Every structure is written in structure tokens, then in C-alpha cells.
Image (cartoon, rainbow, N blue to C red):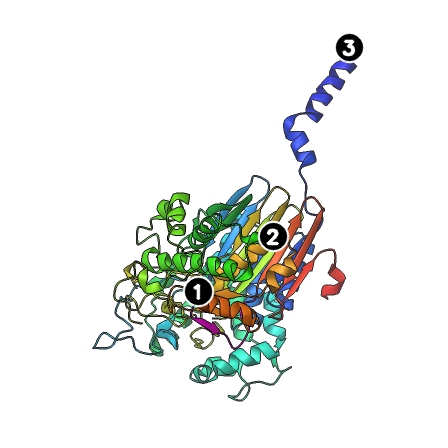
Amino acid sequence: MHTLKLLLSAALIFFSPLSVAEISAPKPPAAAVASAHPLATDAGIEIIHQGGNAFDAAIAVTAALAVVEPAGSGLGGGGFWLLHRESDGFQTMLDGRERAPLAAHRDMYLDEKGEVVPKLSIDGPLAAGIPGVPAALEHLANQYGQLPLRQSLAPAIRLARDGFAVDARYRRLAGFRLKALQKSPAATAIFLDQNELPTTGFVIKQPDLANTLEAIAQNGAAGFYSGPVAEMLVNRTRTAGGIWTREDLMQYKVVERAPIKTRYRDIEVTSAAPPSSGGIALATMFQILEHYPLDQLDKATRIHLIAEAMRRAYRDRAEYLGDPDFVSVPLKRLTHPFYAAGLASTIHPAKATPSDQLPGIADNRLGSDTTHFSIIDRDGNRVAATLSINFPFGSAFVPAGTGVLLNDEMDDFSSRPGAPNIYGLVGNSANAIAPGKRPLSSMSPTFLEDQQRVAILGTPGGSRIITMVLLGALEFAANKPPQAWVSAPRFHHQYLPDRLSFEPDTFSEETISALATMGHPLKEGSRQYGNMQAILWDRSQNSVIAASDPRGNGLASTTENRDASQLD
């Protein structure tokens, strides 16, 4: 009898709902990392091989990109980390966006006539907001990681000390910002060779940045926001014309925000919340496009309808969006299906709506950087992170002794209502400069999920980020593989300027003619744009596939195709 009771108890335990769920819950067959630089991808894979989870790997990749891809991100910048914890389904967005210095004010980039002073919000230390990346690294380690922060930062510290080789992409972006870099002696010493553009293969070593990373590894965020590093940041920024204070650094905190969720057909879309405009804009566009059978339409009509959805989402971006800690964002209204249905009713099926016929922002007078990575681990935890210092090489200013390249994210504020920023985006008072405020962003790290598939994706690209994510998501909806998401031809409409822009060779002459007949002003770009990094976990196929945009020089790897022995 006693034996029978034991057997019955064991059976009840074995067949309990929790145990069955745990046994049947599928897990990814491999971990994967896709990032904009092979050395950063290797750093993430290295930390996973050491027992780290996706969040530890995110620390490693974030820090490594700060070293090897200085044109796109860094300790002197900010970002959004979209997180999914598989054990309980918890999702959050870690907001490490830069903040305006406490001495900032809404007219700080205007002259005595009220006009925007060219490049004042782009070049030099006055253009820099207070960075959020160092605080985010500590938060990820303390709240979500499994490894000590020092261990996750070790690959980046090694890369900073040993150096990385200049490639063609680095040369192109450094050449684009050469004059600005030459104005900062510390930036010149780090990123150039004898004050000139380094040749391909030239090794860039960053001992000062390694020391700053070491300070963070030893002391957490305090190693950056206080102590000797903070003193150098403030003193040398102010000497060069900046307005940072020790109080600015001491007050910085990351914020966790609830992601924006919407649906497109049978796909759940999870994306970034304000101060990102990405999630709201994607919700608007997806809910508008829900009204049309896109897969049944001819190419020109399909492009026309997508462009009109883009136009209306970007109009709302300009009118309503800003830092939710400072302004009231009508989130429920902008993401409601009824609101999108109203917008859809204003779209003519065969005729473009001129942007000046839409209700506009006040006083309307009228990129290709940032970085993104995607990660999934064997437990199903996942991270989509988009990071930035804004323009290539940010403000092009380095406070001597820190190795930290400062952002120029202050340009993402509206210097004046209706005045376009460096990416041509306009804004209203909701995104006006204010002390401690976070500027509006287009960064859109995103998860997509249906009954069998999970996608992790995002991209750099300035004002075009949101539309690139939309087009990648539509490829996912069409059941295409990740390589199709990252390589699909791209087009873009952002309300103002009123034009439909597109990559070279995206449209045929027939399609261009049809779109022009519909009334779309068209502009073909001189080069491709974006650098999407994506991962697919297909539960039905028990597979994980990672893809890196062929436009960049990134690397997508899984632990199946890149074992620890290949990382030496």
C-alpha cells in the first residue's frame, strides 16, 4: 500500500499542469547573435559559451560595438533594449536614451533672429546629451543577467586594448565626418592616422576607452557617472564649449517602459515605446494596412498604399510625440484600431494625398548610422537593441583621457517647431528642448510572433528606421526567411519632405511611371541604406536562423555554426 501511494504521488507530480508545460515548452535548438560587426557578434557568442544568457550577451555586444563601430554607437550615446524573458513571458523596454543637460533650453540652437544656427546641434560638445549606455549596461547585469558585469565587458575591454582593423565602411563614414573629427584633438588621435583618414587595415587601439570600460567593470555605472571619468567628461566638455555638469551625470537613470503592442493579421507586434516613435508609428501603419489585401494587389498599388500609411504615421509623429515624462502622448488614441480606420478612410486607392492637405504641424517652413543587434539564447530569452550616437561619429568630440565619443542627439529635439533636423524630420512643441528631457527617437527594436514563429529585428537608418522595420515585418508576414527581411528593397515616406524616396533599382520604370501618375513625387537615392539584423526562431521546424543585412559588414551567427574554439 505504501508503495502504491508513492507511485500515485509520483504520477500526480509528473502529470501536474506545470510539469507538463515545462516538459512540452519548446526551446530554441541554438542561441544566435546578429550584429553590425563580426567582432561584436563574436563577443556575444563568447559570453553565451561562458554560460551567459541573452541579456549578458547584450551587454557584451553593446560594449563591443562601442569599440569597433564608433560611427554608430558608444558609451557616449544611448539606446533602447527590448527584452523578453522566456521563463514568465515578461517583456519590457529598457530606455537608455540620452537626456538634455540641465542647462539646456528650447532656444539654445537659435540665433538672435530665431533661426536655427547650422551645425550647432550636430558638431561639438554643445550637441551632446547625457549618455545612457553605461547605466543600461549595469541595469542589464543586475536585473536580468547571470554573469558579473566584469565578465560580460571583458571582450570589449580586450578589443579596445588590442585594436580593430579599419574597413571600407569605417573609411567611408570617417571620411564623411573628417572635418568635424579634425576639430577634436582627442578624436583625431583615436580615429585618424596623422590627422588624416586611416588606410584599410590600419589598427585602431583605444587605451583610454579600455580604461573607462574597466572603471565600469569595477564600479558599475558609478565608474562612468562619478569619480575620475565623470570629472574628465565634465571638465573637458565644458572647456570645449559644452554645458554638462556633475549633477547631469549623477541624475541620469535608465527607465523601464511597457512596450507598444499591436497586431497585424495573426502576428503580435511588440516594439519600442515613447520616447521612441517606432512602436506607435508601426501600430498606425499596420492597422491601416490591415484594411487592404496587400498580397493580392499589383506592385504599384501596394507601394502606394504602404507609402500613404507611412505618410500618416509620420504626420502624427511630428504632431504628437515626445518624451512621455514631459508631455502627454495620446497613446491610446494613436494606437486604437478605430483611429487607424479613420486614417485609412482618407486614403484614395489610386491617388497620393499631398502632405500639405493633411492637418499639419505649426509653423511648417520647410541617416544612415546608429546600430542594431538581435539575440536569442537557448532558453528563449531575447533582446532587440537599437543604439545610437545619432550622426556618424556623433558630435565628433572626445573629452581627452576618456576615450568616449560623445553623441549629437540634441539634434533629435525640435530646435524650432517645423524646422527639420539633420534627417529632414520635423516636430512640434511636444519634442521641444527642455532640461532633463529625452529627445524623440525613431529607433524601433521589434519582436514579431505568430503561433509558430518568433522574429527579432531592427535596423539603423535615422528617419527611415521605422519604415525599414515595417517592410521587414511585411516580409515576415509573407512567410519569407530572415535573409529576405534584411535584403528586401526599401522605400520610404516621412510626411515631410513630401516625396517617396527609394533605394537604387528598387522600382522598375513601369512602377515609377505608375506611382508618378498617382501623384507621388519620387526621389531615387544615390546608395542603399539601413543595416538590419534579424533572427527567426521557427518552433515548427525546430530551427533558429540569423541574418545580417548584405548592405553592411555585420555577422549573424548561431552557437551551432560558431563554437567556442572559433572565437580564439
- The residue lying at 56 percent from left, 43 percent from top is 266
Type of amino acid at the residue the image marks with label 2: Ala
- The residue lying at 51 percent from left, 66 percent from top is 491
Badge 1 marks a residue whose secondary structure is loop
Instruction: Answer with the quarter of the image where residue 493 lies.
Output: bottom left
Marks 1 and 3 sit apart, C-alpha to C-alpha, by: 83 Å
- The residue lying at 63 percent from left, 74 percent from top is 162
461 or 511: nearer the viewer: 511
Dot 3 surroundings within 10 Å: few (below 14), some, or many (20 or more)? Answer: few
Marks 3 and 2 sit apart, C-alpha to C-alpha, by: 59 Å
Residue 518 numbered mark, or none: 1
Residue 478 numbered mark, or none: 2
Type of amino acid at the residue the image marks with label 3: Met
Judge whether residue 406 can be spotted in this image: no
| Dot placed on the residue nearer the N-terminal end, 3 or 2 | 3
Please name the residue that numbered disc 3 is placed on. 1
Judge depth for marks 1 and 2 and give the one in front. 1
Dot 2 surroundings within 10 Å: few (below 14), some, or many (20 or more)? Answer: few
The quadrant in which the N terminus is found is top right
